[in-house]
Amino acid sequence: MKSNKYIFFDLFEQQIATVHKGTHLFYEMIGNYQDVEAKVKAIKAVEKEGDEIVRRIMNELNSTFITPLEREDIHQLAHTMDSMIDYIDGVADRMYLYQVRQPEPRVLAQANILVKCSAKLIELIRTLRKLDHQVVSKIAREIKDLEHESDSNYRKMVSDLLNSPDANPIEAIKLKEIYDKLEDCADFAEDVSNLVEGIVLKNA
């Protein structure tokens, strides 16, 4: 019978699968920008799934005497992954509430980067069972490359928005907030990657 302490790996894998599901739903929403309210609700439901997994991780942390990783690392990793899905949910919600009519093509590109990031994070979280530093370093580099791609795309989005002679100031404020939150999502993906790298180095 599997020791209870290893349930953390199961829960982390469930959590990152939820993040990946959320990025997919967001990408589909942007790619087919119709029935937005229903799509936002679907993303919100996934965000709630993520919250429930975080609660389970915290409950396990409080009731498990010996943990496979340091308690602080478990806590931080769970909450950083949760931040990623929280921000995706927040962006989707704002797009509906701010009545964004049609997203710019770069928003779809940004959503696609987030899908790729979350797919790589699934691979990365699975490495926690074996703590293989070589494999972790390779995946972490790929995630950093995606974050740099996201950063470049973000700068172009903001530049186009603020330099447009026809820009409506109120619309520009709304869109800038959305673009900022989208970029934060990619930053959280890199934060997760950095945390896992640190955990593996500590425990190797």
Image: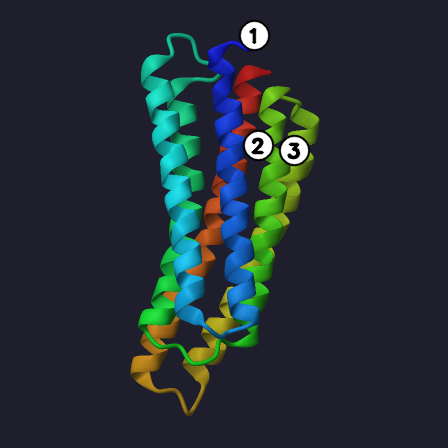
Marks 3 and 1, how far apart in space? 32 Å
Residue 140 location, x and y as percent?
Answer: 62, 38
Instruction: Judge depth for marks 3 and 2 and give the one in front.
Output: 2
Q: In the picture shown, does residue 177 fall above or below 200?
A: below
Quarter location, residue 74: top left
Q: Which residue: 37% across, 45% down?
A: 48
Asked whether disc 3 touches disc 1, contact meaning CB atoms under 8 Å apart, the reply is no
Q: Secondary structure at mark 3?
A: helix
| Residue indicated by mark 1 | 1
| Residue indicated by mark 2 | 125
Residue 82 location, x and y as percent?
Answer: 40, 41
In this view of the protein, can residue 132 be seen by the observer?
Answer: yes
Quarter location, residue 57: top left
| Residue indicated by mark 3 | 137
Residue 43 location, x and y as percent?
Answer: 43, 55
Instruction: Judge depth for marks 2 and 1 and give the one in front.
Output: 1
Q: Secondary structure at mark 1?
A: loop
Residue 182 location, x and y as percent?
Answer: 45, 60
Q: Nearer the viewer, residue 94 or 80?
A: 94
- The crowd level at tag 3 (other Cα within 10 Å; few <14, some 14-19, many 20+) is some
Give amino acid for label 2.
Ile
105 on left or right of 81: right
Q: Nearer the viewer, residue 152 or 79?
A: 79
Q: In the picture shown, does residue 77 fall above or below 70?
A: below
- The crowd level at tag 2 (other Cα within 10 Å; few <14, some 14-19, many 20+) is many
Quarter of the C terminus within the rendering: top right
Give amino acid for label 1.
Met
Q: Secondary structure at mark 2?
A: helix
Q: Which residue: 52% across, 54% down?
A: 23
Asked whether disc 3 touches disc 2, contact meaning CB atoms under 8 Å apart, the reply is no
